[in-house]
Image (cartoon, helix red, strand yellow):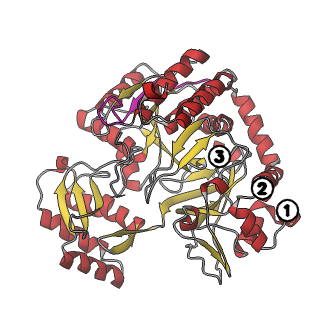
Amino acid sequence: MIRRLGASISFDDVAAGARFLGGARAFLRRPFSLEQARATLRSRLERREASFLALVDRAVYRHAASPYRQLLGLAGCESGDLERLVYQEGIEGALHSLYRRGVYLTVDEYKARRPVVRGSATLTVRPEGLRNPSSASHVAVRTSGSRGAGTRVGIDLAFVRDHAVNTHLTLEAHGGTDWLHAHWGVPGGTAIVNLLEFAMGGTPPVRWFSQLDTAASGVHPRYRWSSRVVRWTSFVTGVPLPSPVYVPLQEPLPIARWMADVVQTGNTTHLWTYASSAVQVCRAALAAGIDLGGARFTAGGEPLTAARLALIRRSGAQVAPRYGATETDIIGYACLAPEAPDDQHLLHDRLALIQPRPDPERTGLPPLALLVTSTLATAPVILLNVSLGDQAVLVQRTCGCPLERLGWATHLHTIRSFEKLTAGGMTFLDTDVIRVLEEVLPARFGGGPTDYQLLEEEAGDGQPRLRLLVHPAIGPLAAEAVAEAFLAAIGDRSEGERVMALHWREGGFLQVERGAPLTTSSGKILHLHQPRPIMRYQS
């Protein structure tokens, strides 16, 4: 059977597919109502501390491979000590106390880029120590690998159901109980999870648009078989699930037309996709004179900046930002009374967030770094004060929107990566790149978000090379002028940045080229793209 499926489909893939089909029947035949979802949320919030302690006891203290067990031991924190901390100070207070005692993982430690050093002790994080020992693997997804190789994460259908509760409650708050949902991304585990989440609330997506042509030569057969698994699931369960329709990222006009046509019938279309992908649809609509008034987007995976938000709104559409990670799924969802373009409510029934405080040990984490902790029993990966490389403004405020009334009172916004990006031998921050690529260059030369992108590569002689891609649609321009404007803007904040810009200028590291920005294997358009052959394979 494996030979018939293709040389790159392993026995583990076949076994996972069998587990998925076996579990999907019971999973999809038990959809929940909104009232049941609200009851589940109330129970989670009431039992939040007890659920967290039970999870840590089972997945950390009783799990010998867990790195957190070793960190808690070094901190002298036994199970009873943690229980007292939680009931005296709350989960977040306890997590702050643990952080001060060295119980945390930086993003480099979590990704095993460097060992964990606490005092005289040195630990190494291994994937098996992070997995939830009670979680099954029905769907395999991969982290995006934006800063390195992606990591495989096994998702339990029970976790998909738990997360679907949040998805449908947030959509209801935005008025989306009768929207016609669609998904646009790359086929695979992430897309399957999204389809299932909507189906669990009784509203399966009506369209599934694929950014990848699964029939193309060289595409890994896993992408083709993921769409077939969805078809089989639909047949076995009787729940209508759509088949993927290929719509490339650079040619999104069919999606814009479909959304506008549905709106004309009096319905509301809702496209779940990445922020840059939503921008592509809206740009195509504006260019074709299509009014997207009444259309809705949920956009995540990348920052929803002011520039991206403005362009989406010019098309007539509305957009709700979301924030999450493969290991956690959604962490935050859009506030209806926002103070920033990406203002969101923290879904704290499923996880906890804290931020570092001044610490004499100098962990290297910035003050606004987000340390994430799992609280749900079905979490696929156990996180305990883990940095995923992001920072944000985290505040408690009264907004009066329906999400606050559900119990989610904590807000986060201005969510950005704080990881240092290295290009051409020099280092800068993601926030600086966003400012120059989305504001400075479009104001000077035209275009908008997703029209400019940096690519870091290694030349044939081993020397670093930094390419600045400029979309051909912008029209004629002088490459030298673009390069000089970029270097001047990236070096206008500090003396160190000026030295960096001078280094790039004199070393000839920066080359301006015309071309459409490249995408990751998951369909994101990153501001700094480090090309890696993910979608293609060698048999």
- Are discs 1 and 3 less than 8 Å apart at CB? no
Quick check: 477 above or below 38? Answer: below
Q: Which disc number belongs to residue 380? A: 3
Residue 31 placement, left or right of 182:
right
Q: What amino acid is at disc 1?
A: Ser
- Dividing the picture into quadrants, the one containing residue 64 is bottom right
Please identify the quadrant where the C terminus is shown: top left
- Are discs 1 and 2 less than 8 Å apart at CB? yes
Q: Position of residue 442 (x, y in %)?
A: 25, 57
- In the image, which residues are magenta? 201-219
Q: Which residue is mark 2?
A: 56
- Dividing the picture into quadrants, the one containing residue 251 is top left
Q: Position of residue 446 (x, y in %)?
A: 21, 55
Q: Marks 3 and 2, Cα distance to the nearest angstrom?
A: 13 Å
Q: Is residue 4 visible?
A: yes
In front of the other: 460 or 527: 460
Q: Position of residue 84 (x, y in %)?
A: 88, 64
Q: What amino acid is at disc 3?
A: Pro
Question: Element at badge 3?
Answer: loop
Residue lying at 70% horizontally and 59% vertically, measured from the top left: 66
Q: Is residue 441 magenta?
A: no
Quick check: 327 above or below 284? Answer: below
Q: Position of residue 472 (x, y in %)?
A: 17, 49
Q: Which badge, 1 or 3, comes first in the chain's sequence?
A: 1
